[in-house]
Image (spheres, rainbow, N blue to C red):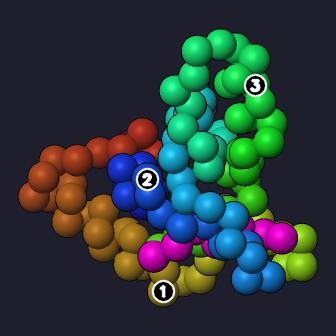
Amino acid sequence: MTTRISKLFGMDIYQTDATYRGKVHDLIVNLEQGVIETITTQPLKVNSKIEAKKIITEHSIPYNKVISADDILLINAGNVPITNRKKEIVHNEDNFEEKSKEAAIRKKYIGYRSKYSRK
């Protein structure tokens, strides 16, 4: 699942059991890992740490619960089995030949060589 962060603001949030949870107001991003940590349904423009803590504890959703982000944000309500989000690499001879053809074209015309290419 790939989408721009700016597209997420203002999206409606629904659970898999069709419960409306609110709209995306703010996102908390972990810059070191480059991932979204939390979605808040209330704006984080507050005057004190106590108010910010209240919003984060009561009006936020962990981003790891997000199943899909297209027209709405769909989050897991606990009734859908969690699957591993990492794409599985399919190893077959056709796929390997296709990748090696692409690598040969890049090498010939672009001069691109990745750190994984053979020397």
| Image position of 101 (left or right of 99) | left
User: In the image, what residue occupies the spot 37% across and 58% down?
Assistant: 7
**In the rendered structure, does residue 115 fall within the stretch colored magenta?**
no
Q: In the rendered structure, which amino acid carries the disc numbered 1? A: Asp
User: In the image, what residue occupies the spot 45% across and 76% down?
Assistant: 71
> Which is nearer the eye, 64 or 90?
64
Q: Residue 12 placed where, x, y %?
A: 54, 67
Mark linked to residue 53: 3
Quickly name the residue at label 2. 9
Q: Residue 100 placed where, x, y %?
A: 37, 69
Judge whether residue 87 can be spotted in this image. no
Quickly name the residue at label 1. 94
Question: Tag 1's secondary structure?
Answer: helix
Q: Which residue is the extreme one toward the top?
A: 48
Sequence-earlier tag: 2 or 1: 2
**In the rendered structure, does residue 73 fall within the stretch colored magenta?**
yes
> Which is nearer the eye, 4 or 15?
15
Q: In the rendered structure, which amino acid carries the disc numbered 3? A: Lys
Mark linked to residue 11: none
Residue 21, located in which quarter of the rendered image?
bottom right
| Magenta part of the chain | 71-77
**Dot in front, 2 or 1:** 2
| Image position of 32 (left or right of 52) | left
Q: In the rendered structure, which amino acid carries the disc numbered 2? A: Phe
User: In the image, what residue occupies the spot 80% across and 82% down?
Assistant: 17
